[in-house]
Amino acid sequence: GLRYSNDTLYMSFSAGLNRTELKTENLIQEVGLQSDFNIFAYNGYFAYNFKDKSRISTWFSNSTQIPSVRQLQPVSIQTDPLNIVEGNPNLDAAIVHRINLNYNKFDYKTRSGFGLYTSYTYNQDQVVPVVTTDEDLVRTTTYTNLSGGQQAYFSFYLNKSLKKTKNENDREDISFGTDLDLTYRKNLGFSNE
């Protein structure tokens, strides 16, 4: 990866290719499975310290989740005749993309300041179940990839400390603070298709 820093600035970035190969063989049903997953992985960080003791930073990354053998295996699992599970060998790995932004200005001497934090997450090729129920009430579950699940978060805080000092041994402290948190979620899936 790349990295740079000085008194006020820090930056880093790294990227690479993650390769996962999954092989399995079902000896009972005589079915084999081979899946290869090649994922571009990245992460980065940037921070800047201002002269007024404030700071801004952002970081971004992705992570992956490989489908399980049960989700991939092209066989029908009928241990419960009313709930059949069939894998999908064409599934892709799920990728979660994240970005965060943070700004704060806090004076540790007066114990006063404010800041904000925000984050955004996007789900690409999330593995989700698809459940169908036939006229005999037999449920069949298989899996597919679905993109578009999201989550956003915003937070703002404010802290203020007031001091009243008559002399070195006689001091009063009053402090107060508040914060605001907002969350947005978009979950995707299938039901009763």
Image: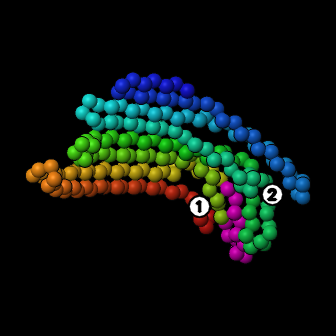
The amino acid type of the residue labelled 2 equals Val
The amino acid type of the residue labelled 1 equals Phe
The quadrant the N terminus occupies is top right
At x 74%, y 49%, the residue is 89
Q: Which residue bears the numbered disc 1?
A: 190
- Near-viewer residue (102 or 98): 102
Q: Is residue 137 magenta?
A: yes
Is residue 65 in sight in this rendering?
Answer: yes
The quadrant the C terminus occupies is bottom right
Is 137 drawn above or below residue 147 in the view shown? below
- Near-viewer residue (183 or 172): 172
At x 90%, y 58%, the residue is 28
Q: Quadrant of residue 26?
A: bottom right
Label 2 residue SS: loop
Residue 152 shown left or right of residue 36 in the figure: left
Is 132 drawn above or below residue 98 in the view shown? below
Of the image marks 1 and 2, the number of the one nearer the N terminus? 2
Residue 89 shown left or right of residue 58 in the figure: right
- Near-viewer residue (2 or 19): 2
Where is residue 174 drawn, in percent x and y?
Answer: 19, 56
At x 42%, y 25%, the residue is 5
Q: Which residue bears the numbered disc 2?
A: 75
Q: Which residues are magenta?
A: 132-143
Whether residues under marks 1 and 2 lie with C-beta atoms below 8 angstroms apart, the answer is: no
Is residue 87 in sight in this rendering?
Answer: no
Which dot marks residue 11?
Answer: none
Where is residue 101 drawn, in percent x and y?
Answer: 39, 41
Count residues near mark 1 (Cα–Cα under 10 Å), then give few for <14, some for 14-19, many for 20+: few
- Near-viewer residue (15 or 162): 162
